[in-house]
Image: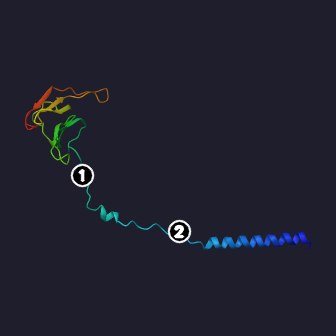
Amino acid sequence: MKPVLSSCLIIAICLFSGLAEVHAQKKQVKPAPQAEKPAIDLESYFKPVFWRNLGHSRGGRSVSATGVKGNPLVYYMGITGGGVWKTEDAGQSWKNISDGYFKTGSVGAVAVAPSDPNVVYAGMGEHAPRGVMTSYGDGVYRSTDAGKTW
């Protein structure tokens, strides 16, 4: 065997044995540890939480809402096809305060007089939401006892 060929063969064997050793070390590498469970068990954490509806229980969309200045718990909401609704607990529960008083159901505007929180105005009707339909109102209603009568 010629000296150049034998030298190349020795170098190749050394390189191959070095690569084989590196490959063997890679096989021995342990996988990364799995992510630990969160400290809080989310299932039990959210167990006391329950779903509830917010807002009025009657269908329709609202195009007007207003609050009472100085009282963050009281709000009025005008519903298209649903009258005027009032909350006294910042929206936790709502009650209709216009049924039996209004001749039409579609409320397009609701406002509280800045000078007296007991005076509430409800403007009836609404603009055409899709440009092809509209609900005409029958005027403006006024309550002087915070919506108890109109």
Residue shown at the point (34%, 63%) measured from the top left: 42
**Residue 32, numbered label:** 2
Label 2 crowding class (10 Å Cα cut-off): few <14, some 14-19, many 20+? few
Judged from the image, the secondary structure of the residue bearing numbered disc 2 is: loop
29 or 58: nearer the eye?
29
As shown in the figure, which amino acid type bears the numbered disc 2?
Answer: Ala
Residue shown at the point (90%, 72%) measured from the top left: 3
**Residue 52, numbered label:** 1
Whether residue 55 is visible here, answered yes or no, is: yes
Residue shown at the point (12%, 29%) measured from the top left: 141
Label 1 crowding class (10 Å Cα cut-off): few <14, some 14-19, many 20+? few
As shown in the figure, which amino acid type bears the numbered disc 1?
Answer: Arg
Judged from the image, the secondary structure of the residue bearing numbered disc 1 is: loop
Locate residue 111, reporting x and y percent: 17, 33
Locate residue 10, reporting x and y percent: 82, 73
Quadrant placement of the C terminus: top left
Locate residue 30, reporting x and y percent: 56, 72
Badge 2 or badge 1: first in the primary sequence: 2
Quadrant placement of the N terminus: bottom right
Whether residue 106 is visible here, answered yes or no, is: no
Residue 60 lies in quadrant: top left
Up-down: is 18 above or below 63?
A: below
